[in-house]
Image (tube, rainbow, N blue to C red):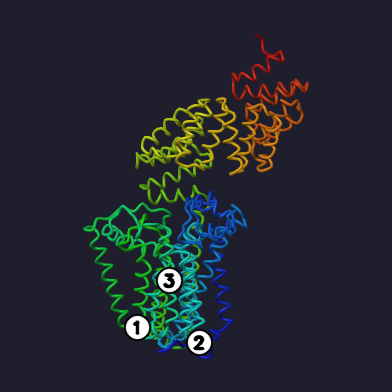
């Protein structure tokens, strides 16, 4: 048997270009419509280490450092994924629109590749006998059902999971190119392109490794070629796959030097037992997408309790294997399902026992099974009830309407699921509602709430996380950070100390303690905590700032200047430039301090601390009107900054504007009764009696 396109179509040119263009356009419009509300979705969770703070994606050269980063959470085994993020950063920096655009475009291209593969397969002579030559419409619905299903949102809307979408794209593309080669009189060029797509997929995610086995199964079922004959007839293809697998092995080895496989505290037997239940959960979320959850905390299932699930899966696998042996297409789809899940949901323990994105590739097999079954059911109805042409047309129209309704419902469900990704708070609220026992989700919700200034709610979330995991150091750090933002310094210090009691190597706790002590004027303690934080994380910016400024406050000005200058030179963000100005100001070098403060403001015009520092330097230089203007700029944004009100009042006194000065001093006292600077200012104006 050979691949045979529908009648009237040239196998070398593919199918009808007009039909293809219409189907591709419909797929693109449907995917963009379903994800139209995702382009402003912010960075969440792993997006911060992978994108926001990752240094390797901030440049496109040297290329080796971009492809194989040595810092952050970017994966050395996924160079194409890393490169794509670097390109996005070059285009839009930390604006998320270009990242989301690439993810949605990858989903469109994957849908196109799946459509092409499905139509080619439905175009086989044996398949045409079963499906009446409706390759185009069947492939369109199959691709729509797959592409629009909400299970894809984790990989498309959540930027850091782009690796899954890229892998699936190259998986479908490589499979289609291989099959297209078998339909051609000159397969070499198609198979060479298939190998290139496979290699690209290997550079995106490791799970593409199952593709060669799936293509052997495809040849067995649809082309009646055994594995030995298949490899001999397509030596270039399978030889290229072998080299691709070898490359993938090198990438995985580079990712985990000295490791021979995945690492997890769960034994392979317990992991397999747990996965037997998880797989049925995956089938559940495919059938009912509202159960999708961003972050599962799936309990480990004892082997004894997993026996019913293991037995059911074994029965399904055996049925798929028997149907495969009989060269039935359903057997191929069943083996596709199990092969696609094998790398993540078998006996190789991974850190996360359940992630919805693992169903994206198996979903294509399920979609094909549903479409084929629906078509056969429709044919049965036509044979039974379509006795006249009018009835047949009505039933056919009803079938098309049903398929379109399912696609529309899936697209709307995806659009609705994207609303959960609208803010970090919304996605984590949804997660804790679905997994209330997940302490990591409560912790992440607290961090999101703390980032939006909802400190009381952040404290509540942190306490719920600690109720579930009392020894969790990061949750204590979150609690301390929220207390600090609420100006409850004593409780913040106690929380950071509790974090260190449970996790002595928590550099964030040490760094935050250095901030607490520096702000409270306990500079020797700030220096000690900053040094401890930097011993664990030498590039931790807040600790280096606290160290330099505390050294300056304790009179170690030369050491402070060296530390601050090194920081400003290697990490020239606005805060470091401001810190350099502050150190120089304390050293009495007002002119040099002015230059650093000005540079900090040019780097970030919203740096109000640099604006206040520059105003102070100008005040001491006698440039009173310039200083007053800077203080006023700060108050336009932050009208309740008491120290700025007092400083502006003092400047206005010297500018002989006592009425304006009195207003500033009085407002400062209204905000902070007993403020000594405001009291002295009013006393100097004669409004306070001794």
How far is mark 2 from mark 3, CA to CA? 29 Å
Task: Name the mark on residue 382.
Answer: none
Task: Name the mark on residue 186.
Answer: 2
Residue 163 place in picture, x, y as percent: 48, 62
Between discs 3 and 1, the one toward the N terminus? 1
Between discs 2 and 1, the one toward the N terminus? 2
Query: Who is closer to the viewer here, 338 or 32?
Result: 338
Q: Are marks 2 and 3 in contact (CB under 8 Å)?
A: no
State the SS at label 1.
helix
Quarter occupied by residue 672: top right
Task: Name the mark on residue 364.
Answer: 3
Q: Please tell me which residue is depicted at 44% across the width and 51% down the height of the picture.
A: 430
Residue 552 place in picture, x, y as percent: 58, 28
| Callout 2 crowding tier (Cα within 10 Å): few <14, some 14–19, many ≥20 | few
| Callout 3 crowding tier (Cα within 10 Å): few <14, some 14–19, many ≥20 | many
Between discs 2 and 3, the one toward the N terminus? 2
Q: Please tell me which residue is depicted at 37% across the width and 41% down the height of the picture.
A: 472
Residue situated furthest bottom in the rendering: 8
Q: Please tell me which residue is depicted at 63% across the width and 30% down the height of the picture.
A: 640
Residue 406 place in picture, x, y as percent: 46, 69
How far is mark 3 from mark 1, CA to CA? 27 Å
Q: Are marks 3 and 1 in contact (CB under 8 Å)?
A: no
Query: Who is closer to the viewer here, 242 or 277?
Result: 242
How far is mark 2 from mark 1, CA to CA? 21 Å
Residue 90, above or below 388: above
Residue 149, above or below 650: below
Q: Is residue 380 visible?
A: no
Quadrant of the rendering where the C terminus is positioned: top right
Residue occupied by mark 1 = 228
């Amino acid at each position: 048997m050979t691949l045979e396109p529908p009648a009237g179509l040239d196998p070398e040119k593919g199918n009808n270009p007009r039909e293809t263009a219409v189907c591709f356009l419909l797929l693109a419009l449907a995917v963009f419509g379903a994800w139209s509300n995702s382009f402003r979705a912010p960075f969440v969770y792993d997006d911060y280490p992978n994108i926001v703070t990752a240094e390797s994606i901030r440049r496109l050269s040297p290329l080796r450092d971009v492809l194989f980063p040595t810092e952050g959470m970017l994966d050395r085994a996924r160079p194409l994924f890393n490169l794509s993020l670097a390109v996005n950063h070059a285009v839009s920096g930390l604006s998320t629109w270009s990242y989301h655009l690439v993810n949605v475009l990858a989903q469109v291209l994957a849908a196109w590749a799946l459509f092409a593969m499905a139509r080619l397969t439905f175009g086989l002579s044996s398949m045409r006998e079963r499906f009446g030559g409706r390759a185009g419409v069947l492939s369109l619905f199959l691709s729509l059902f797959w592409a629009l299903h909400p299970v894809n949102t984790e990989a498309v809307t959540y930027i850091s999971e782009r690796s899954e979408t890229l892998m699936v794209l190259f998986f479908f593309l490589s499979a289609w190119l291989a099959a297209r080669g078998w339909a051609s009189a000159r397969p070499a060029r198609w198979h060479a392109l298939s190998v290139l797509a496979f290699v690209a997929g290997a550079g995106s995610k490791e799970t593409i490794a199952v593709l060669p086995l799936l293509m052997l199964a495809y040849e067995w079922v649809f082309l009646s070629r055994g594995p030995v004959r298949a490899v001999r007839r397509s030596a270039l293809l399978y030889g290229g796959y072998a080299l691709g697998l070898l490359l993938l092995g090198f990438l995985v080895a580079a990712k985990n030097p000295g490791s021979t496989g995945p690492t997890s505290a769960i034994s392979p037997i317990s992991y397999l037992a747990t996965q037997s239940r998880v797989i049925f959960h995956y089938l559940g979320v495919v059938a009912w997408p509202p159960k999708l959850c961003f972050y599962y905390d799936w309990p480990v299932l004892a082997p004894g309790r997993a026996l019913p699930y293991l037995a059911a899966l074994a029965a399904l696998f055996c049925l798929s294997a028997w149907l495969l042996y009989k060269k039935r297409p359903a057997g191929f789809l069943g083996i596709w399902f199990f092969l696609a899940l094998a790398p993540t949901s078998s006996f190789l323990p991974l850190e996360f026992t359940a992630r919805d994105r693992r169903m994206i590739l198996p979903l294509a097999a399920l979609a094909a099974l549903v479409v084929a079954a629906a078509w056969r059911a429709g044919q049965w109805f036509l044979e039974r009830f379509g006795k006249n042409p009018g009835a047949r047309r009505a039933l056919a129209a009803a079938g098309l309407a049903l398929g379109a309704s399912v696609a529309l419902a899936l697209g709307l469900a995806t659009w609705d699921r994207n609303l959960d990704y609208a803010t970090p708070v919304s996605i984590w609220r949804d997660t804790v509602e679905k997994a209330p026992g997940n302490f990591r989700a409560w912790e992440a919700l607290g961090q999101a709430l703390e980032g939006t200034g909802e400190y009381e709610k952040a404290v509540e979330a942190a306490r719920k996380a600690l109720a579930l995991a009392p020894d969790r150091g990061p949750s204590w750090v979150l609690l301390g950070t929220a207390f600090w933002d609420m100006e409850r310094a004593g409780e913040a210090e106690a929380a950071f100390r509790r974090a260190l009691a449970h996790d002595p190597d928590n550099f964030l706790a040490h760094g935050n303690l250095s901030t607490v002590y520096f702000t409270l004027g306990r500079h020797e303690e700030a220096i000690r905590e900053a040094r401890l934080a930097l011993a664990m994380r030498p590039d931790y910016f807040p600790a280096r700032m606290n160290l330099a400024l505390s050294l300056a406050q304790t009179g170690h000005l030369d050491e402070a200047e060296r530390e601050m200058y090194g920081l400003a030179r290697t990490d020239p963000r606005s805060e470091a430039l401001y810190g350099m100005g502050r150190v120089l100001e304390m050293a009495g070098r007002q002119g040099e301090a002015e230059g650093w403060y000005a540079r900090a403001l040019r780097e970030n015009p919203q740096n109000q601390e640099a604006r206040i520092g520059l105003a102070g330097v100008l005040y001491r230089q006698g440039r009173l009107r310039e200083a007053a203007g800077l203080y006023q700029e700060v108050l336009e944004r932050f009208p309740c900054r008491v120290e700025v009100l007092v400083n502006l009042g003092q400047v206005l006194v010297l500018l002989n504007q006592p009425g304006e000065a009195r207003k500033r001093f009085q407002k400062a006292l209204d905000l902070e009764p007993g403020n000594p600077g405001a009291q002295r200012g009013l006393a100097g104006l004669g409004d306070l009696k001794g």
